[in-house]
Every structure is written in C-alpha cells, then in structure tokens.
Image (cartoon, rainbow, N blue to C red):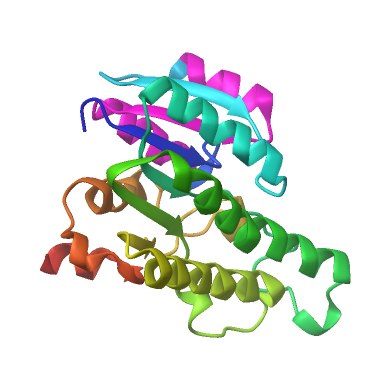
C-alpha cells in the first residue's frame, strides 16, 4: 500500500488503532482522528513502519470537524485513496443495556456517533477521493441479528450498515462493511479477540479484495478466505 493515503476515524484505540498501525507498517500514509488528543499523541510516538502517520483531533459527530479532517488528509496525500470509518461509542454495559430503559440522550448519541458519523465521514470525503477509492465502515453481527442487552447500540450499527448500502447504491463506488467478529475493546467489555487480529481483514478489504465484493454488504473472515 505504498503511497496510499488512508483516512481512518477513531484511530486512537481498539480496532481503529490496530488498523492504523497495520497500515503504517504496510507503507501507507495514514491520517487518523479521534476525540482524545493525548491518545493521538501517544499513538504518533509509538507507531512503527515504512509508512507515515498524521493525527488530528476531530469528533465525527461534528461535520465541520470531519470536513477539516478529510481536507487535511487530501492536502497531505494529494487526494484520499481509502476511508475507514471506525469511530464508535457504546454507552452502557455490553449485554446489560435494555433498549426500553435507555435515555433519549443515549439513543441519540449512539446514532449520531455510530451512524451519522459514518455518513459525515463518507460524505465529506467524497470530493477528495482519488480515481480508485475504497470506503469501509466497521460493524458486526449485532446489526443484523438482534441479541438482548445491546440496546440502541445495535440499532445504531444497523443504521451504519444502511448508510453503507445506500452509499454503494447511489455512488457506485466500492463501499462495504467490515465485520471482524467479536473484538476485545471497550465496546465489548474486553471480550473477544485482540484488535490486532482484526486489522488484517480491513487491510485485505482495502488492498486485495475484488472491488465487486465491495458492494454495500458485509465482509468477514469467510469472505476473505473465499476470495
């Protein structure tokens, strides 16, 4: 992925951080954002690889923050080759968040961060994309298979996947959901695989997957093995 410019939201922790590290190691120029400026500074001083990293504090709930973020990525890279929308929040305890007991503020913030944030990231990136771009958003089976105790977080992920499908339908670009399975992050209460094991699926979707596979649907490990 030498000379690729990849914009990654939510790159200061979890899957986003693992993806940033993997892409830099693979030679890409990565521009990443998060709300925690200190965490971004720590990432910038510890990342290693043949690529380069630029960090910028931004909140995906604020479209003006997102606009400035993608403008930075485009300016430094001469355009954006790929976008990975990884920023997300979960308010509550995984498996113990009943939707009928959630506050309106919680519901709204899940939707605003996890779904509207993907919309803002893709929308603001559109004018800056190069000729052969790829757009990915992180999600999981909770978006498609209801399980108790996941509340409006699951609703927001279903909305995330709907945003991805519609971008694929309306733009004709290679756009997809990446579903790495259960990953041990703050969103899962530390349960699941290490985030580093999830990053190769994202890198494969960016670098090796057939563009026809990126049709608005969800890519998982089975898709990668069958490709």
Residue 158 drawn above or below residue 219: below
Q: Is residue 166 left or right of residue 92?
A: left
Residue 126 seen from this side: yes
Residue 72 drawn above or below residue 166: above
The residue at the point 25 percent across, 25 percent down is 3
Give residue 59's quadrant in the image. Answer: top right
Q: Is residue 48 magenta?
A: no
Q: Is residue 120 left or right of residue 210?
A: right
Say which of 7 and 93 sits in front: 7
The residue at the point 61 percent across, 51 percent down is 186
Residue 91 drawn above or below residue 31: below
Residue 32 drawn above or below residue 131: above
Q: Is residue 37 magenta?
A: yes
Q: Position of residue 207 (x, y in %)?
A: 21, 45
Q: Position of residue 41 (x, y in %)?
A: 59, 19
Q: Which residues are magenta?
A: 16-45
Give residue 101's quadrant in the image. Answer: bottom right
User: Is the C terminus in the top left, top right, bottom left or bottom right quadrant?
Assistant: bottom left
Q: Position of residue 132 (x, y in %)?
A: 25, 46
Q: Is residue 70 left or right of residue 154?
A: left
User: Is the N terminus in the top left, top right, bottom left or bottom right quadrant?
Assistant: top left
Q: What secondary structure predominates along the stretch shown in magenta? A: helix
């Amino acid at each position: 992925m030498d000379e690729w410019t990849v914009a990654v939201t939510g790159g200061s922790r979890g899957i986003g951080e693992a993806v940033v590290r993997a892409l830099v190691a693979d030679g890409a120029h990565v521009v990443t954002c998060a709300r925690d400026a200190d965490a971004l500074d720590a990432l910038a001083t510890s990342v290693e690889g043949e690529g380069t990293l630029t960090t910028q504090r931004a909140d995906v709930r604020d479209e003006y923050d997102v606009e400035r973020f993608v403008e930075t990525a485009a300016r430094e890279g001469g355009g954006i080759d790929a976008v990975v929308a990884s920023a997300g929040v979960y308010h509550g305890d995984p498996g113990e968040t009943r939707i009928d007991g959630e506050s309106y503020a919680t519901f709204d913030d899940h939707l605003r961060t996890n779904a509207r944030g993907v919309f803002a990231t893709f929308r603001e990136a559109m004018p800056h994309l190069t000729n052969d771009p790829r757009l990915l958003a992180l999600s999981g089976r909770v978006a498609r298979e209801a399980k108790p105790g996941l509340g409006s977080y699951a609703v927001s992920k279903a909305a995330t996947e709907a945003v991805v499908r519609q971008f694929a339908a309306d733009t004709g670009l290679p756009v997809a959901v990446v579903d790495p399975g259960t990953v041990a992050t703050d969103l899962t209460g530390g349960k699941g695989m290490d985030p580093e094991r999830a990053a190769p699926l994202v890198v494969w979707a960016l670098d090796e997957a057939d563009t026809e596979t990126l049709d608005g649907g969800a890519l998982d490990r089975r898709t990668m093995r069958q490709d």
